[in-house]
Image (tube, rainbow, N blue to C red):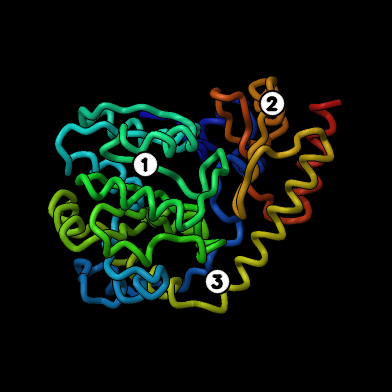
Amino acid sequence: MLEHGGRLRRAAHEYGIPLEAWLDLSTGISPFGWPVPDIPSAAWRRLPEDDDGLAEAARAYYEAPQLLPVAGSQAAIQALPWLRATSHVGIIAPGYAEHAHAWQRAGHHVKTLAARELLANIGAWDVLVLIHPNNPGGDRFAVEELLMAHAELAARGGWLVVDEAFMDVAPQQSLCRYTDRAGLVVLRSAGKFFGLAGARAGFVCASPALLESLQEQLGPWALSGPARYVLRQALTDRAWQASARVRLLRTSERLAVLLARHGLAPAAGCGLFQWCRHDTAARMHRALAERGILTRLFDGPPSLRFGLPPDEAAFERLDQALAEVLR
C-alpha cells in the first residue's frame, strides 16, 4: 500500500519515543474536531438504514442535488475507476497519490502532470482528476474554469473528478451544487474539517445514474450506524461549522508565519495544513521526528507538510524544534 501520514505508532517504535509524547503534525486532520456526543446503543445493535436523515443533512450541507455516503472518499477513489472502460486519465501532481494508484490498478492509461498542463490539454483525457484545494500542492481553481473543463470532457462522454477533501474551510468554491451534470463527480470527506477521520466517512456528489452504479459497486451498508448518527448531527451544526472555519484559518495563518520565520516560507497551504518545499526535507523530517514531532514527508518534490498545532504549547514546541534543526 502507499505511504500516508498518521503512522504515529510506527514512528513511536522507530524512534523509541512513547506514543503519548509525540506532536503529530503529519495529517491534514483538524485538531479541533467536532465534539462527538454519546452514541445511542441502538446505533450499534441495528443495521444502518438509508432513510435516517443523513443524506438529507449532507445534501443541505454540501448544497448537492444528489449524493452517496461512502466509507471515506478513499472508498470512492478505489471504486470509480472500475465504472469506466479503459480510459486516458490525467491526474494532478503533486497530489494525493491514491488517485493515480487506483486508476492504474484498474488498467487505465494514467499520466500525472501539473494542473496547468492538464487543463491546457483537455483533449488528451477521457477523465481528468483534480484536487481542490490540492493536497499538498495547494492548487486552486476558479469555478468557471472547472465548469468549462467539465463541459469539454462531458461533450465526449468524459468525466471531471474533483477531490474536495479540504474544501470545507472555503465552501463557496465547491462544485457540489453543479453535480447534477453528467460526468461531474465531486468527492467530499468528513474526516478533515470535522476531525472525524476515524469514522471513515465521506460523500460522492454526482448524477443519479453514476451514483447508482457506484452504490452497486460498493454494496450495502457502506457507513456504520454510529458513523451515520454522528455525521447527521455534525453536518447540521452550523454554529460550530462557522466558528471552526475562523479558528482553522487563524491557526493556519499563524503556522505559516512561524514556518516563514525559520526560513520555511510555505509554497502552498490551506486552512488545514502548510506545505514547505526544501532540498533537505528528508533530513528535517528525521530531525523533527527525533524530537517527537511527526511531519509528512514527500519525495517529489522534496517537501514537508505541516498539520496544525493544536494549542499554544504545541506552537512553542514546534518553534523550538525548528530553531534547533535549522540553526
Q: Residue at position x 45%, y 52% from top?
A: 145
Drawn side of residue 321 relative to residue 97, left or right: right
Q: In which quadrant is the N terminus drawn?
A: top left
* Neighbourhood count class around disc 3 (C-alpha, 10 Å): few under 14, some 14–19, many 20 upward: some
Q: Which mark is residue 129?
A: 1
Label 2's element? loop
Q: Please, is residue 146 above or below residue 174 in the view?
A: above
- Labels 2 and 1: the sequence-earlier one: 1
- Residue with the mark numbered 2: 278
Q: Answer whether residue 208 is visible to the viewer in this image.
A: yes
Relative placement, left or right, of 28 versus 228 is: right
Q: Earlier in the sequence, mark 1 or mark 3?
A: 1
The location of residue 246, given as percent across then percent down, is 66, 67
Crowdedness of circle 2 by 10 Å Cα count: few (<14), some, many (20+)?
Answer: some
In this view, the mark in front (2 or 1): 1
Q: How far across and down, in percent of the image, does residue 24 sit?
A: 61, 42
Q: Residues within 10 Å of mark 1 (few under 14, many from 20)?
A: many
Q: CA distance from mark 1 to mark 3?
A: 28 Å
Query: Which residue corresponds to the image point at 63% horizontal and 32% vertical from the top-left?
Result: 304
